Image (cartoon, rainbow, N blue to C red):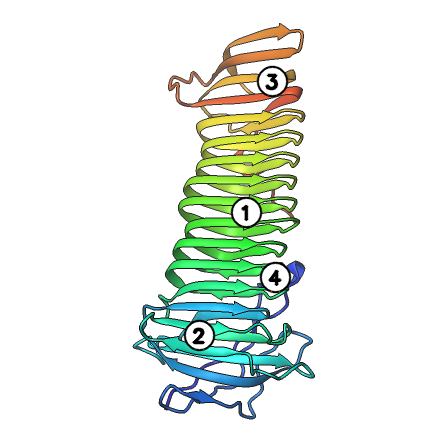
């Protein structure tokens, strides 16, 4: 007989609650036991874990005997949550536990739901076109299980504490939440839902958010990161990568502390970087750029129709090339060998900060239709501490 495991659920998807209470921090329900043999079990009398305000009932549960290094394939119109097996209870990591829950008063028909394991493919498939969209499917899988998940309609997906080689998630209008996920290759695509990364997400990361979808990130760490949005906000607190490319058609790009070789592009939106350590290239057609440079590689900033604000530490060594309709260098910034050239369409200022000698360390800022402002700012000021 299998040992008990704790229940867990989705929780509320409102971003304000996600930030305030840490998302989907659901209370565990009473332990459940499964019959031996890896078969299925009809629900007992135990209460299920439910999102706030919704009473959910367990409709059916499965315990499948699997290879620890397999794959989960899910095609569902409802909510799906995946987390790892308890390693103390399942030391061999050879089970996939599946539970289906429905809202009280919701449809209870599971005739169209398939839950099966293909031993040859080493694949668990959970497939349905007809399950109630308000239902939820909860999966406990081996830690190293690959994931291939597609949700339709407003079905949301949450992945928590999984480590795998490949993780692919696609939603239509549903939110994707990744919490403390590690994957060699992580691909997320949504046509209209939110993408929320909590804790640290590791790996080579590819995120595409269409329409008004927003992307909100605590911390990404990996070799390559590629994130694109259309009309929604793209926001990240920490990026630790070798190479990152972030783009948005009309939404703003707002970043905290970024490290590595970073390229940012926006057509209509503003670009803000609280702290850059490394090489940074940022461009926008109609938005403004606001960047604090703490440690310098190469920095190249361009706003075709907006203005640029560059903030640096007073000890930074750099070659400067600042051009725009107006260029304003604060008197607190000590620039040596400064030259100022006025033209009909603006002004160009060049110079050195703190006797910079390494030619690969430079800052270029160009705002042909706007103003370039260059300011000194301490690291402490860059923290933007709030009461």
The mark found on residue 331 in the picture is 3
The answer to whether marks 1 and 3 mark residues whose Cβ atoms lie closer than 8 Å is no
State which mark lies toward you, 2 or 1: 2
- Gap in angstroms between the C-alphas marked 4 and 1: 20 Å
Give the residue at x 59% y 76%: 131
Of labels 2 and 4, the one closer to you: 4
Q: Can I make out residue 85 in this image?
A: yes
Q: Quadrant of residue 177?
A: bottom right
Q: Whole-Å distance between the Cαs marked 2 and 4? A: 21 Å
The residue tagged with tag 1: helix, strand or loop?
strand
Report, in whole angstroms, how far the alpha carbon at label 2 lies from the one at label 3. 60 Å
On the image, the x and y values in percent for residue 38 come to: 38, 86
Gap between marks 1 and 3 measured at Cα = 32 Å
Q: Which mark is residue 302?
A: none
State how far apart marks 2 and 1 are (Cα). Answer: 29 Å
Q: Percent position (x, y) of residue 200? A: 46, 55
| Residue 249 point in image, percent of width and height | 62, 39
N-term mark: 4 or 1: 4
For mark 3, does the 10 Å Cα neighbourhood hold few (<14), some (14 to 19), or many (20 or more) residues? few
Alpha carbon separation for disc pair 3 and 4: 51 Å
Q: Which secondary structure, mark 3?
A: loop
Mark yes or no: residue 383 visible: no
The residue drawn where x is 46% and y is 78% is: 115
Pointer 1 local density, CA inside 10 Å: few below 14, some 14–19, many at least 20: many
Residue drawn at point x = 34 percent, y = 68 percent = 70
Numbered badge on residue 174: 4
- The vertical placement of 82 against 310, above or below, is below
Which residue lies under the disc numbered 2?
Answer: 140
């Amino acid at each position: 007989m299998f040992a008990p495991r704790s229940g867990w659920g989705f929780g509320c998807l409102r971003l304000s609650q996600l930030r305030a209470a840490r998302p989907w921090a659901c209370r565990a329900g009473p332990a459940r036991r499964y019959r031996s043999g890896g078969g299925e079990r009809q629900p007992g009398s135990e209460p299920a874990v439910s999102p706030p305000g919704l009473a959910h009932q367990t409709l059916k549960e499965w315990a499948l005997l699997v290879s620890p290094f397999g794959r989960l394939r899910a095609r569902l119109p409802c909510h799906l949550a995946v987390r790892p097996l308890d390693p103390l209870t399942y030391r061999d990591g050879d089970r996939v536990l599946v539970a289906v829950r429905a809202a009280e008063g919701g449809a209870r028909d599971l005739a169209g739901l398939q839950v099966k394991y293909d031993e040859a493919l080493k694949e668990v498939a959970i497939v349905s076109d007809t399950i109630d969209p308000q239902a939820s499917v909860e999966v406990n899988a081996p830690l190293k299980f690959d994931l291939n998940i597609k949700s339709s309609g407003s079905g949301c997906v949450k992945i928590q504490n999984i480590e795998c080689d490949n993780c692919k998630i696609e939603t239509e209008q549903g939110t994707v939440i990744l919490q403390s996920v590690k994957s060699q290759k992580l691909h997320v695509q949504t046509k209209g839902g939110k993408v929320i990364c909590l804790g640290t997400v590791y790996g080579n990361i590819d995120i595409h958010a269409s329409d008004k979808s927003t992307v909100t990130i605590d911390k990404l760490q990996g070799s390559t990161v590629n994130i694109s949005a259309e009309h929604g906000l793209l926001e990240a607190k920490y990026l630790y990568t070798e190479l990152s490319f972030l783009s948005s058609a009309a939404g703003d790009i707002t970043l905290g502390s970024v490290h590595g070789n970073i390229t940012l592009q926006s057509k209509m939106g503003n670009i803000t970087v609280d702290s850059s350590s490394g090489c940074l290239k940022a461009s926008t057609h109609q938005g403004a750029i606001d960047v604090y440079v703490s440690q310098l590689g190469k920095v190249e900033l361009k706003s075709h129709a907006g203005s640029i604000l560059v903030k640096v530490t007073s000890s930074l060594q750099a070659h400067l090339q600042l051009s725009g309709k107006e260029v304003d260098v604060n008197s607190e910034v000590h620039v040596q060998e400064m030259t100022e050239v006025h033209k009909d369409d603006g002004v160009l200022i060049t110079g050195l900060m703190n006797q910079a000698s390494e030619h690969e360390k430079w800052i270029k800022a160009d705002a042909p239709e706007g103003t370039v402002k260059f300011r000194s700012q301490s690291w402490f000021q860059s923290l933007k501490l709030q009461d």
